[in-house]
Image (spheres, rainbow, N blue to C red):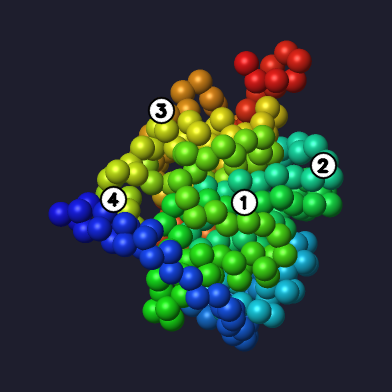
Amino acid sequence: MRSLYNAIGFRIRKALRFRRPGVVLPNETKTDLFEFAKREERPSLIVRENELRKRYSLDPLFHASSRYIYRDNLYWLEGLERCFEGLALQQAKEVKIVDVGSNNFHYAFALTRFFRVAFCAQKIDMCGYEIDGHVIYADLRSRADYAAAYLEQAQVGRYVVGDFVASTERDADVVTMFFPFLTKDALLWWGLPLDFFSPAALIKRASECVKPGGFLVVWNQTDEEVNQLDKFLEGMTPVLRVRLRTNIVDYGEATDDRVGSVFRVPLCDGGTRG
């Protein structure tokens, strides 16, 4: 029944393609940013926030975001740092990033700034794919409307409402997948019909989108999902796998079981994939 309900809702949203541009991102004071944390944890969190803000030039986000969105971007930066810790990244003038399942792309600022710093890049070419981008929020604006605002704030990137599996996207330096739906329950919970449950095809398409020598980054909610991921990527071994537990957000307990995996697509003879 839930799948039928989701299917009807999805088709209506797809047909309407509702858009209401002009999202003004709220700015909330960042005083007591970590008021949710235990008192003894707050000093270290403040130090961590200051480090991340300086390293990734987060002032524009700091001064034009809600506390929730700002903390979430801090979490994405923290997680990406763990995922790439110790990995040698070759400097590049331009880095192409493809993000799969971008929701409303509220983490676009963190994603852009991290890879710009990590690759010492002068330019970031970033594209986010979201199959259900016309979900309407309480303020009568859609995911796509908010994505446009977040990308404008990050001053980079494109947002595509469509099925990534059916796309022709290729030759990405990095493909990111944050919490892809690898179980039916997760997909249904987030409002999609079972027609779109094809995790093997999704993971395969993501790995094929990465150019030789590039990276596939996947964050999963549980070890069970990680096991599923490894089955879909049989023959590929992660160069790094880390826990994504954090106390920098107010939903820290929900991150207890999260895992980040980084796969590197090998270079074959002649610098091409076999």
Secondary structure category for the residue under label 3: helix
Residue 195 location, quadrant:
top left
One can see residue 250 in this view: no
Tell me how far mark 4 sits from mark 1, CA to CA: 24 Å
Relative to residue 203, is residue 269 drawn left or right? right
Q: Which residue is mark 3?
A: 231
Tell me how far mark 1 sits from mark 3, CA to CA: 27 Å
User: Could you tell me the amino acid type at mark 2?
Assistant: Ala
Image x and y of residue 223, in percent: 39, 41
* Sequence-wise first label, 2 or 4: 2
Which residue sits at x=43%, y=64%? 17
**Mark number for residue 193?**
4
One can see residue 153 in this view: yes
**Mark number for residue 127?**
1
Which residue sits at x=40%, y=32%? 200
Tell me how far mark 1 sits from mark 2, CA to CA: 18 Å
* Dots 4, 3 in contact, CB < 8 A: no
Image x and y of residue 174, in percent: 65, 41
* Sequence-wise first label, 4 or 1: 1
Relative to residue 152, is residue 89 drawn left or right? right
